[in-house]
Amino acid sequence: MAKYVYFFGGGKAEGRGDMKEILGGKGAGLAEMANLGMPVPAGFTISTELCTVYYQHKGKFPPGLRRDVDRAMARVEKIMGMQFDDPVNPLLVSCRSGARRSMPGMMETVLNIGLTSKTIPALIAKAGNARFVYDAYRRLIQMYSDVVMEKAAGIEPPEGKGVRQQLEREMAKLKEARGVKLDTDLTVDDLNGLIEVYKAKVQEVLGKPFPDDSDEQLWGGIAAVFRSWNGKRAISYRRIEGIPDDWGTAVNVQAMVFGNMGDTSATGVAFTRNPATGDGHFYGEWLPNAQGEDVVAGTRTPNPLNEATRPAGTEHLPSLEQAMAKTYKELVAHRNKLERHYRDMQDIEFTIQEGRLWMLQTRVGKRNGPAAVRMAVEMHKEKLITAQDAVLRVTPAQLDELLHPILDPAAEKQAKVIAKGLPAGPGGACGQAVFTASDAVAWAKQGKRVILCREETNPEDVEGMRAAEAILTARGGMTSHAALVARGWGKCCIVGAGALKVEPEHKQFQVGGVVVKEGDWLSLNGTKGVVYPGQLPMVVGTEENPNFAAFMKLCDKVRRLGVRANADTPDDARKARQFGAEGIGLFRTEHMFYGKGAEEPLFKLRKMIHSKTLDERRKALDELYPHIKADIKATLEVMDGLPVTIRLLDPPLHEFVPRGEDERTRLAESLGISLDELAARADALHETNPMMGHRGVRLGVTYPEISECWLRGIFEAAAELIQEGKKALPEIMIPVTCDVGELIHQAALVKKVHAETAAKYGMRRIPHLYGTMIEIPRAALRAAEMAQAAEFFSFGTNDLTQMTYGFSRDDIGAFVPDYVEKKLLPADPFQILDPIGVGELIGLGIQRGRATRPNLKVGICGEHGGEPASVKFCHKVGMNYVSCSPFRVPIARLAAAQAVAEDAEKSAKKKGKKLEGDK
Ligand code: ADP
Ligand code: MG
Ligand code: MG
């Protein structure tokens, strides 16, 4: 039989940290910690490959597995000095799931396996602590009946009727009857009685007794973990996260250590750095006399790990640093070792059994955008990682979080706080309150923004959490389920707002006399953990973040691809420069005819368009000219010598035909023609297919005077700036070309206007470049000739995609979603550049263009220029720059840096493989 079982413990392991694919993340982490000599309870991992085999064989284990498991168990027994199912010295184990990538709370774990009427008395005698044994046993019944007897058996109880919830209600009843608040306040007798109630309840709900056999418990647990891979929650989580269904989960069987043996025992969760802010201090939570999920489940408010990170409002709680100073120091040493070893923030689980520390898990910790950026910057500063590592540590989506809005601080000052909680996911959010996950999904589908308000969340809520703008819970700490999941998604989240009285049955919560009902607006500041009623305005918050600037510097150091912005106004240009654009890759002059202050130029443009004779048109152009020059000059001035690619006029003519009666009258008057004549001229402008009509360079060919006007505007604006002692670098871009002839034709006009303008200003040369947009497939194919006339190409990928697919940009809504859903297309090609079709044209265009003109400058304009996968494509085909909307510039800078770092990583791996092969 293939190897399916990997042992770990006693300072060594059969597996390694880089074997996640086989061992799952948890198994790999346990193996690695064991190899590092850390105190890991012995155990073994049954590989993810067996999960696949298990499903292929319709839920049967291959023969031989039992033998391998028995052997591994014997090694565990030897190291731990206890025996499984032994009536004198019994070993208990846990059965833990663990996929390649962490899926927090999505799959199952069962603790305390091996407690039976045979082993219980022995354990009580040995531990001298009956309370602890009964506590462990009631937990086993809760977890096992839920995970193995109900979920794995495929039983889907109605909401609130699951066996676990029913058992939890029994415990709540008991606590109420005893007048105690915490589990830990229950006595031995209470627990003993509870166990009998539990057993009866299990029999009643599931129609089966709770198994009193260690072996049955063990194999039931193993099978249940494998089955949890195909549980409903796990499947929907995989869909959201894009995790393939065939990866499978591993099962880790591990000797139990007990944090619930009294006050010198404890359990905790920690992060080597703060996952919500990136702060470099060791950060975490712990509970004395507790087991397993207690910290995460939010049933008791956890204590802070140390003094340096103690949150406000926890002054009455002891930190681990205070309560168990020596053990804490040990834990810090492990923290340091793990971070140095993994060179990344780790998410750690530990348990202390009667003063002795055990490490139970380590994995790369999830973090939100602001934390990812800060950690990347600081770890690089600490020389833990290289600049290339650093840029790979932040995903474009995480960087995007920093570019996203926060509540307007000014408005916040005026607003009244209704509740405070822990800041689990930073940023701001506004939305309408909803109280169940399914409502969150339904409301979001209707296009509403919602805030999911819960007592606490559990893995069943993930889809609702996903759909919500933000999550607000009354219970739970910074490592609670809600916090963990929200952080992974970079979602605004506040947990543990203890003053909230959440009443899902009435779809409302109460807090300090205020009632918030379903549909009421709330505003959350997830950075501070503050809740406001109503809808506060939001603003973008990068300016206040020094790590953002430092991180972008790292990106710039690594990347080779230039990044420019598409900007049409001086305001946009300023924004673009703030975001780090190195020029403008697309300046559309049509912009001046839209929006505020556009009335006058628009009127003059209409006049020009409706002109019939050359004379009329010249006159109209003369009137329009000052606007054009002023517009171009203003933006060139802001860019201060950085290149600005100015596209010559490319108007959708039909959009400029006036509709209103007044407007038509005014226009006819100004042109000195009748209304009928104007109507006739407007009709003549009508095109059947304006997308492929009389536009772009075609206008310039028919009416060279239009091109001349724009060219004059460009040259005069530049000349004036230069004479004012400023800098200007315009790049003249001819749109909608398909043949070099068009470029030659327009180049003659450029030459002429340049000569005239230079003479007028007494200059020998006005700096500029001449080039074209490549947006028609023919232009890409004939690039060799196009490059004879053009000094640069800018791929206009919106139109190029339209023309290559024959998909009308404006009409794809009707069918492209179907194509994507039916997997006929991997993605909407207007969002993510098609690398093999449109991409092939681009590649060819660059290659042929550079064969003619080796220093041909090549860029991309169009929304693809800010989409990370497309940016990486542009890097790969050797473009000089990408250009995108100003807000996307940081994303493009990051993607460009990642392209370099990924290349380097790949070739390093190849080299490594080769070296291994040489050995
Ligand atoms: P998850 O993936 O949901 O975190 P885990 O397998 O890590 O599930 O286990 C749940 C909890 O039980 C964790 O707090 C873990 O530390 C604890 N736990 C798991 N195995 C053991 C063990 N052998 N001894 C003590 N605690 C354990
Ligand atoms: Mg869990
Ligand atoms: Mg865990």
Image (spheres, rainbow, N blue to C red):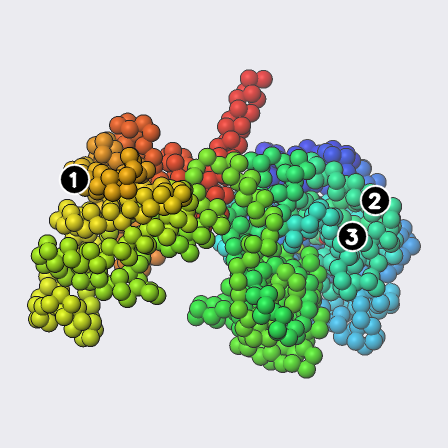
The x and y percentages for residue 462 are 56, 61
Residue at the spot x=32%, y=54% of the render?
630
What amino acid type should be assigned to the residue bearing mark 3? Ala
Residue at 27% x, 56% y: name it: 626
Displayed-image quarter of ligand 2: bottom right
Q: Residues within 10 Å of mark 2 (few under 14, many from 20)?
A: few
Asked if the residue under mark 2 is in contact with the one under mark 1, i.e. CB atoms within 8 Å, the reply is no
The amino acid type of the residue labelled 2 equals Lys
Q: Is the shortest distance between ligand 1 and the CB of mark 1 under 8 Å?
A: no
Q: Earlier in the sequence, mark 1 or mark 2?
A: 2
Q: Quadrant of the N terminus?
A: top right
* Residue of label 1: 745
Give neighbour class at mark 1: few <14, some 14-19, many 20+ (Cα, 10 Å). Answer: some
Q: Give the Cα separation between the discs numbered 1 and 2.
A: 78 Å
Residue 231: give x, y in percent of width and height: 56, 56
Nearer mark to the viewer, of 1 and 2: 1
Residue found at the very far top of the displayed protein: 918
Reading the image, the residue beneath label 3 is 308
